[in-house]
Image (tube, rainbow, N blue to C red):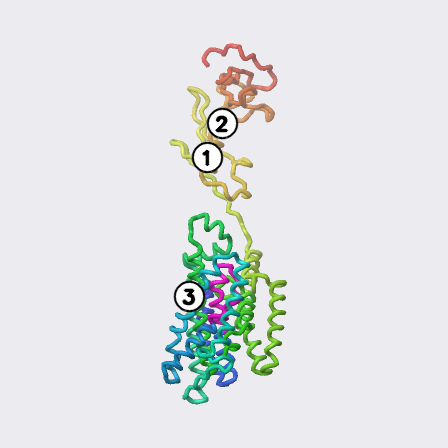
Amino acid sequence: MGCFKQAMKHIRTLVVLAFILFSLVFPILIGDQTSTSMAVDVLLLTGAAVAWNIFSGYTGYISLGHATYYGIGGYVLALAWQDWHMPGDYAPFLLLPLAGLVAGAFAIPLGWIALRTSRYTFIVITIAIFFIFQLLAYNLKGISKGSEGIFLPPPSWSSDLFNLPFYYVALALLLLIVGTSWWIRYSKFGLVLSAIRDDEERVLGLGMRTGWYKLAAYVLSAAFTGMVGAVAIYFAGFINPSFAFDQTLDITVVTASMLGGVGTVLGPIVGGLVLVPIQTYLIQQFGFIATGFDKILFGGFLLVILLLLPEGIVPSLRKRWYALKASRKTYIPEIPSPRFTSIPGVSPGYVDSTATQGTPMQSIPIEQQPGEIAPAILPLLSEQSLSLRMSMSFSQKIRAQRLVPISGDSSMSTHEPMAASPVTSWRCPHCGKPFLLSGNTCYCPRCGFTRPLTGGKQPLSSSSTLPSGT
């Protein structure tokens, strides 16, 4: 039972390890090149969704032009391989850091300009940046070869193992992006980004320079997107402006992130694993016909998400899980045990009552009265206040027990401490102070009010003098 509880506490770690182990053995277990090729596309597009979430999910600035850096990373790899006359096979994978650096370098001035605007204007500017770079790729034919594109030589390894290197490189890149996203989410940097998403004006009022935080997240997101684009271009073996700067990529990553949960670590992964296989399957099965159909499908998915799951799959499931745990948990308030102030010479649970001088000591048991213990409906009552209340009640009992007759009434004995009528009050009607007893007369030590011990006699006036021996 204890092992099971420990396992439940580390459920996230177990799920992550299980996912990594399954991903490592997936191509070996399947052995189908079509399924492995689909898995490569799923990993790459999921990585692009996680990279997009690092900026847009954490800051709340929605970017609809991240395909710009996807295309920049692809062209960097293609042009570097072509101009440097690099061999094929594994050598192009060494250009992935360069593709990420160049994409991040382009993101610095573009992000600095775009992020000086409001959130809604930022969306329009990112779309404009995307179309600008797409047109540049069409018109700069000396660099990009225009619509003809650039062909990359296929790797020389066996056709049976053709997809395996791309699969494991894509998996490693995805794990790198997810690890970075997780680090940002639970760091001070991510805390500032989340605060910007919630209330940027308040963060500015606290003296934080939000512009640098947003720009850093934007550049990091663009660099990872460029690396994903470089792997995708090498896997496809061909690049042209329409393939590198594809607006469908922006729709895919945004829809996948919103489906899984924007601003969470696992959200884009869940959304990518659910949505991207559908897109990849449609493209592989129907080819060019599915190019327009998947956009309609993604638009429908986006509408369903906004209507039914506005927060995404992961946040919605988390809330329902917490609600289920709260409904099953029964709250039983703890009743604090009473604490009595210890008095020297008095045994626990008993009070030594003395009447006046010369009266022998009597040991009378204390009975708990209703209302002397703090009610169970007040669980937030502190132990100090409870102890104070109990000690006050304790002292009141001592005073009440001292109202024992000293002498001679035949109707009372010294062993019957509470022989007075139940309706007789032992407090002064003027000041509320407990009476003291002198013979058969009760008197108030504060205001001098007196009355007889028994209820049948009329009380004496407050100006009456007390009998001798008081």
Q: Amino acid at mark 2?
A: Gln
Bin the neighbour count of mark 2 within 10 Å (Cα to Cα): few under 14, some 14-19, many 20 and up.
Answer: some
The amino acid type found where label 1 is placed reads: Leu
Q: CA distance from mark 2 to mark 3?
A: 73 Å
Q: Which residue is mark 1?
A: 388
> What is the chief secondary structure element of the magenta stretch?
helix
* In front: label 2 or label 1: 1
Instruction: Residue type at mark 3: give it.
Output: Thr
Q: Compare residues 314 and 235 and report the one nearer the observer.
A: 235
Q: Which residues are magenta?
A: 45-69
Q: How far is disc 3 from disc 1 in space, using C-alphas?
A: 54 Å
Query: Residue 52 or 130: which is nearer the viewer?
Result: 130
Q: Is residue 150 above or below residue 414?
A: below
Instruction: Kindly indicate the quadrant of the structure image that contains residue 259.
Output: bottom right
Question: What SS does tag 3 mark?
Answer: helix
What separation in Å lies between label 2 and label 1 (alpha carbons)? 20 Å
All told, the count of numbered labels is: 3
